[in-house]
Amino acid sequence: MQMTPKKCRNEHLKYRYGIKPEEYFHMLEEQGGKCKICGIHQSELKNRLVVDHCHTSKKLRGLLCAECNIGMGKFKDDPNILEKAKQYLESFIE
């Protein structure tokens, strides 16, 4: 039996994050269809918002666009590093 893209996504949500599609769409609705960090709307993106989670506790944090999700990972999900990056960028604002 061949998996449809929808069934594949649903299985991924269940396997990877332990949630049903309804829970994903509830999160999406709570966020107004937007990335929880940058605020870009789902309709402006090529791909769906992704489920962001803590890799240690596995706790779900929200839905992010791919760029924000990758950015969080590059900063190792560390608020201290993110704060230093913020201060660095602010030091160049005139």
Image (cartoon, grey):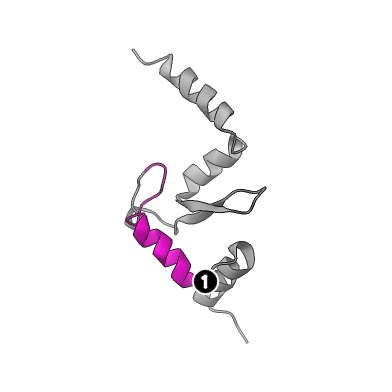
Closer-to-camera residue (17/66): 17
The crowding category of the residue bearing disc 1, from other C-alpha atoms within 10 Å (few below 14, some 14 to 19, many at least 20), is: some
Q: Residue at horizontal 41%, vertical 14%?
A: 92
> Residue 19 location in percent, x, y?
54, 67
Residue that lies at the very extreme toward the bottom in this rendered image: 1
Residue type (three-letter) at the residue carrying disc 1: Lys
> Residue 64 location in percent, x, y?
46, 50
Q: Residue at horizontal 42%, vertical 18%?
A: 90
Q: Quadrant of the N terminus?
A: bottom right
Q: Residue at horizontal 58%, vertical 79%?
A: 3
Q: Is 49 one of the magenta-colored residues?
A: no
Looking at the rendering, the stretch of residues picked out in magenta corresponds to 20-38
Q: Residue at horizontal 51%, vertical 26%?
A: 83
Task: Using residue 41 as the reference point, say whether residue 47 is left or right of it.
Answer: right
Is disc 1 placed on a helix, strand or loop? loop
Q: Is 36 one of the magenta-colored residues?
A: yes
* Mark 1, residue position: 20
> Residue 80 location in percent, x, y?
57, 27
Q: Quadrant of the C terminus?
A: top left
Asked if residue 49 is positioned above or below residue 70 in the image, the reply reads: below
> Residue 17 location in percent, x, y?
59, 62
